[in-house]
Image: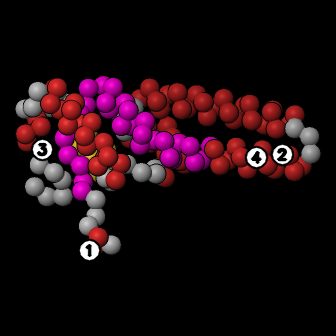
Amino acid sequence: MGAFAHASAWHNAPASAVRSANSSKEYVLAMAKLAIYMHTSGDSVLHRSGFSLLAALALPVWALRQRLYKTAFVALLVQLLLMVLVPRLSAQLEGDMTRAIAALLYLCLYWAVPGLFASWWHRHVLARTGYFLVAVEPPPSPATR
């Protein structure tokens, strides 16, 4: 069994049973660090929840590691577009303090948003492409904290 909940019953379960079990396990997934998703074809994916430092630093690289090729392409296009637009837009702002606040806001959003929402997006794409949750890492017990 290991650190994950037993998953062999989920592999052969009908889709309706898996869907209802997934909805009841959503609260567990919110606290879990690792989860295993499986596709009906037999392919499995390990999903890590929480903040992703790699996604915050280089979203296209993170997306490629997760095999999210369309996301990597769109993220690369958005980053290239931002590289062109942000300097032009910041030149339109008047005053050094206004530019500094705008730059700080831009950097916080640029780094924080991908890092915070990357795992949610990965989970969303997995569910949309037919993967279903089969096992989650249990939260740490109070004795181990």
Q: Which residue is label 2 attached to? A: 99
129 inside magenta stretch: yes
Q: CA distance from mark 3 to mark 4?
A: 48 Å
The amino acid pointed to by label 2 is Arg
Q: Are marks 4 and 2 in contact (CB under 8 Å)?
A: yes
Q: CA distance from mark 1 to mark 3?
A: 26 Å
Q: Which mark is residue 143?
A: 1
The amino acid pointed to by label 4 is Ala
Q: Which residues are magenta?
A: 110-138
Q: Which mark is residue 24?
A: none
Marks 1 and 3: which is nearer the front? 1
Marks 3 and 4: which is nearer the front? 3
Label 1 sits on a secondary structure element that is helix
Q: Residues within 10 Å of mark 1 (few under 14, many from 20)?
A: few
Q: Residues within 10 Å of mark 3 (few under 14, many from 20)?
A: some
Give me the residue at 54% from left, 32% from top.
Answer: 75
Label 4 sits on a secondary structure element that is helix
Q: Quadrant of residue 137?
A: bottom left
Give me the residue at 62% from left, 43% from top.
Answer: 110
Q: Position of residue 104 (x, y in %)?
A: 73, 50
Q: CA distance from mark 4 to mark 2?
A: 6 Å
Q: Which residue is label 4 attached to? A: 103
Q: Residues within 10 Å of mark 2 (few under 14, many from 20)?
A: some
Earlier sequence position, callout 2 versus callout 1: 2
